[in-house]
Structures are given as C-alpha cells and as structure tokens.
Amino acid sequence: MNTKKFGKFAMVGVLALSLVTTTTNAIAADSNATINIGSLYEPQNLDNTGGGGQGVTEALNGNVYEGLFKLTDSGKVENLLATAYKISSDGLTYTFTLRSNVRFHSGKTLTSADVKYSIGKVTAANSQSARKSSFKVVKSVATPNDKSVVITLSSRSISFVYNLSYIWIVNEDAKDISASEDGTGPYTLGTWKRGSTLSLNRFDGYWGSAAKNKQVVFRYFTDATALNNALLTRAVDVITSEQSPDALAQFKSSAFKITNGASTTKLLLVFNDRVAPFKKPLVRKAITSAIDNKKLLQSIWGEYGTLTGSMVPPTDPWYENLTKVNPYNPTLAKKQLAQAGYPKGFTFRLDTPNYDPHPAAATFIKSELAKVGITVNINIITADQWYNNVYKKLDYAATLQEHVNDRDVVWYGNPNFYWGYNNPRVISLINAAEQAKSATAQTQLLKRANRIIVADAASDWIYLYPQIVVASSTLSGYPINGLNSQFFAYNITKG
Amino acid sequence: MKIKSRPLTLIVGYLLVGLLALVALVSLFWTPYQLSDTTGGRLSPPNLQHLLGTDKLGRDTLSRLMVGARIALSVGFFSVLIGAFIGITVGIGAGFAQRRIDESVSALLDILIAFPTLLVAMLIVAGRGSSLSSAIIAIGIGMSSIIARLTRLLVKRVLAQDFITASRASGTSWPRVIVIHILPNIWPTLIVSLALQFGLAGLSEASLSYLGLGAPPPNASWGSLLQEAQVTVLTSPIAAIAPGLCLVALVIGVNLIADGLRSQGDPTLRKI
C-alpha cells in the first residue's frame, strides 16, 4: 500500500470512526428520553406526612421535593437547599443559610418561611411522618430574613442535620399536596393515574443541573411476575427492587444488568413487649434462638441478603455484627423457655401481612417454634389491618413487618412505639447518644445501646433484605442502593 | 336382557375424581412428609426422597399436593352443600310464589348472578377474614343464586304438568307434592348442575387462595401452591405444573361426571 492510498484509507477510517462515535454519543446522551421505572410501591397519596408510604419516598424524594440536606445513595448527608449552617457553642441553635435562586415549580422563590412551614408540617399533631419523633427537640423556628432560618432546640441533637434530610421543603402556599405538588426538585409532577402510572417531567427552571432525561414514568404493579414480564418486554427500563432471587435467571443475559446494592430494609419478628409472655426477655431470647434465621434467609433470598443480628444495617455508623448474641440453638431455646416458666411452651397469634415474604416467613417460623413446643397461629391480615390493629391499637402479640429506614435503632428508645420495648438503660443511652458532642461518642453510645437491645432480644431481626435492581443494559445513572427506598431518577440516561 | 352401560365420560370422570378423593383420604392419615418439615432443601428437583421436589422453604411438594386435594374436595363438597340448601330452598319458594314475589326474587337472583361468584366470595372473605370456613361459606353463598334460579325454573316447569293438578285434586298436600313429585323430577337436572358447581367451587377456592384469601398458611391449597410457584416457575417448573394439573384433573373429572349424568338422565341423548 503506497502512502497516498494509506492516507485515503486512514481518512475514511477516521471519518467512519468519528461518525460512529458521534452516533453513539448522540444515543448515549439522549437528554429527551423517557425513563420507565417499574415498581411495586405505588404511593397511597403524594404527601410524605400524610401516610403516603414508601412509594411516595421512592417517586418524589429528591426528584420532586428536596430538603435542606440530601441523604445520598451512599448514605452521606450533603447540603442541598441549605448552602451552609452554623451551630452555636451549646449545640442548641442552628443557623441555616438557604440557597439563592431556588424556585418552586409554581414559580415562587424559596424563602425561610417555606422552611418553617415545612418543619411545622412534619411536627404537626396530625403528621404521620416516620421521623416526627426526631423533631420533638425543636423548640422554635425563626426566620430573621428570607435566606436564613434559625432553629433552637430544647436539647442537643447530633442527628439534627441528618434528620432534616427527611423533611421536604414545600411551598407554604401549597395547602394540600396529597394529590398535587409544589416542590423545588428537578422534576414536576406530570400525571398520576392511580393504580397505573405516575409521571414526572423535567423542570426547566431547576436551580441545579437539569435532569438528564426529559420524563420519568413510574409504572406500578401489584404482582412481581407481571413487573418482571414488563422488563422482559421493555415496557419498563428498570425495576427498583426485585423481590425474588428466582426471577433473576431470566435476566442473566447481556440485555440486562443486575446490581446488588446496600439496603436498609429489615424483616422483623416484632414482639409486643408489653404483654405476656413477651414481657420476659428470656422468652424473646428463646424464640430468637429457636428460629434458624440463616435458613430462612436462604429459603427466601437464596444467596442474597444479610444476617445482622440487630436492627442496625452495615450502612449505619454504629453497625456491629451481633448474630452470635442470640445464636440459633433449639436446645438453648428449650432451656430458656423452662427458665422463663414455660417448659411446655405456649401458644400465640402471629399477625402476618398478606404480601410476600411474610406468609412464607410465618410458615417457617411456625415450623421452627413447633420444635420447641411453641404453637403459632398464623393470622393473615391486610396492610390496613396491620396499620390499624397492630400499629395504632397495639392489639397483637407478635407480628412480622419490614422496616425500611436507616438509623432507626433509636426507635427502641421510645417506649411508646408499637413494639413497647422499655429499657431505661437503653433510653438513657440513646438520649445520651443524641446529645453527644461528637459523632464518635454518638457511635460508641449507640453501639452500647444496640448490644443491650440485642441481649434483650427486643425483637428478632430476621434478616436484611438485599437491594437488587434489574435494568436494561442500555440504562445508566440509576441508583443501586435502597437507602430509605429513595430512587433518584435525574441522572438516568438511556441509549 | 340388555345390560345398561355407563357412558365412557362418566367412567373416566369417576376415575379422576375418585383418584383425587383417594389421595385426599390418604392424606388424612399419611403424607410422605409433615407439612412443617423444612429439611428438603430449597427448590430441590424431583428425586427419590421427594418425588415432586420441594418448595423454597424445603417442604415436600407431593405432601402439600395431597393435603391440597383434601382442601379442594372438602371446599367443593361443603360449599355445594351450602349452595344447594340455600339455592333449592329459595328456588322452590320462588317457584311456588305469587307473581309479584316471584318476579322480585327472580330479579334479585339475576342481579346476584350478574356478580361473578369469585367477586361475591372475595367480598365475604374480606368481611370475615381469610380462612377455610370463610372460603366455603363464601363460595357456597356465591353459587346459591345460580342453583336457586335453575331450581325455580325446573319447579315452574313441573308445576305446569297435569300430574301435579291430578295429585292436588286427589288431596295431596303441597309439602308432599314437593317430596314425591317435584324433587324427583328436578333432581336429574339439578345433580348435573351441582356436579358442575362442585368443580367450580374447587376452582374458586384455588383462586381465592391464589389471591391470599383462602386457607391461611401453612395449609396447602392448590391455589396457594400455584401462587408460591409463580416466582420460581423458571427455576422449579414442577412446583407450578403439579398443582395446575391437579386442578385440571378435578375440573375435567367433575365435568365428565356431569356430562355422563346428563347423558344418562336425558332421554333425548340416549342411543336408540
């Protein structure tokens, strides 16, 4: 090949390569794509202080609404609508500076009055926010000017900034956000067809980097198999949380990507610690030792999921593996039952939500406890019945439930919570941890509290769910962890 | 003398339902493994220890299918009993009633029939809570309107016959007319309908259990077996195929029996 020919050949090659690259980039950077997200968790309503459920967090948190701070997918707290904050030397006064040029979707500029209104919405008497109790320390909220908020606490709260990441900043003029919205996030609410879809449209007036896609459509399913089929047929691009390891076989091809991220969702066997026989820690320990949690985890999740032995997932700073505190040991369980005054066991009702994996877990628990003489009557209930009878009326002996939040071991410091665990030492340690002056001190105190909670077998923390996201291989930029059920959509690209 | 032969459909139907009944009966005394036995390993394929493999909790699928047969047949039997009692009583009452009452009852029955049995059953189960007895009552009540409507029609037809007028003229009381004339005359048609309802009741129970509204765990209804197998169908297809085949066998068996009984009872279908 002479030089001239080589030159022509090289030029054609370069042109072809640049054409391919340009085309690929054009596809990869399709900023007008619609991302279809498949989920099993449709919101009950669109207000996270009105019992919207985990679906409302998944769809709207970080996408439509933003807080002063953001809990990232990796569990870090970052500034969001607050650009800076100062803490007084006594740790009781927080002064926040708000980001400028932030507009709500309705067009109004964000002011400190909106922040005050939003905090009040969470702490209101009728608020159903999961973090409501964390804000009991708020003594007053002052708004010296439009860009500053001064919050005074009644006692130190080292988690205060973290807790603020749970509060959506809502336009104070938006009185009812149960079916509409007025947030500051990168998306506005499109349409919500109940039982079917919820769409979000890119907000052109967003203060930060614009969303990398034009529209996001959450498509809701009540059946996991139908959801899997939707991904197979490309009706959805991604499944936010796969619910069965056995469904993954169909996605093990180059057309799909499977990720196993960090989760904060725990499956609990919750005892009503107020009532006999669960008042006695020895009975609770016996039950915990009688159930082979490892086998149950493998039965439900195969090779996925984690045993923690406590409420604390590995993403929490105060995590310790405490699986050996109450080891699986039916012989020990029988001894403990005898010591507790129940040598022949007893009978109790296990209120079991009617959706997976609870019925299967209840069946396994019944089978395990029968070996130590305990008879379990499985009572299948709906989610509504669980909320009304178990959570509100406390009319139960034991129940199964998953808890999705991180850093929620502190709820064992609230004796009025639905499980009724009341250990003054734990309450004192958790309060001290909250008032600690450093994160190290907080971590040490919460580790101590957690060890006592586990030694008391306040509940049986069966396992930590895996967070399996399955997506089309053409998709990128989606979150792989499931902290607090958030699913940030703004970085997702298709192509 | 010509030996009266039974239709082949009837024989096959009896064989299928009889086999399931035998399995259900045996399950009262023996199953290969206890339902609480979770030692079989997760989703074991069929092997010599577990002929139909195991479910994800390690329970023997064959044992669960055997218990499922008991549930399906008992739901079929008892719900048909409830449905027949209510339906025949209302149907005979409507058949004898004055025009306005009859029309009102007929309209009510039409409205009830317009609701699918499964929907009625779901409403009742939702009110009473899910249990086997709830499922039986719900399905029984759900099917009673269909039986009542058929019974009313048959009673009306029989009442129009001359022998009823003759019987009444000879001083026979209405209750006696019902026992000696009406019931024997409507029974051949009713039994076919009841047989069909038996199969549908088994199917309805499976549907309710599939939806989580039937027998609570650890009861092993075929419907709940199917529901559980849904997510493992790719890795353990036998867990879905086996209860599905059992349901098919029950419904086909019962339909064949109904068909056979109809052939036997209907002179127009007999071979000359």
Image (tube, coloured by chain):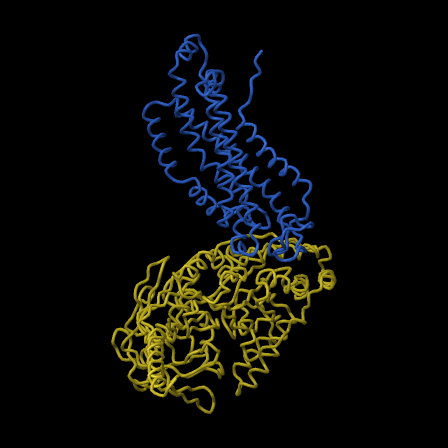
Chain colours: A yellow, B blue
Does residue B18 lie above or below A118 as drawn?
above
Residue A61 visible? The answer is yes
Q: In the figure, residue A316 lies in which quadrant?
A: bottom right
Viewer-proximal residue among A224 and B12: B12
Q: In this view, does A147 lie above or below A234?
A: below
All told, the count of numbered labels is 0
- Give coordinates of residue B166: x percent, y percent: 41, 9
Residue A114 vs A401, above or below: the answer is below
Q: Which residue is drawn at 50% across and 50% down?
A: B212
- In this rendering, position of residue A231 left or right of residue B6: left
Decide if residue B161 is on the left or right side of residue B213: left
Residue nearest the viewer, comparing A446 with B115? B115
Residue lying at the far front of the rendered structure: A2
Camera-side residue of A174 and B56: B56
Q: Can residue A185 be seen in this view?
A: no
In the image, residue B231 above or below residue A18: above
Judged left or right of residue B79, residue A455 is: right
Which residue is situated farthest in the top direction here? B170
x and y, in percent, of residue A14 in the image: 35, 82
Image location (x, y in percent) of residue A88: 44, 90
- What quarter of the picture does the C terminus of chain A occupy? bottom left
Most extreme residue toward the bottom is A89
**Rendered location of residue A52, percent (x, y):** 40, 64
Q: Is residue A187 left or right of residue B49?
A: left
Position of the N terminus of chain A, as image quadrant, is: bottom left
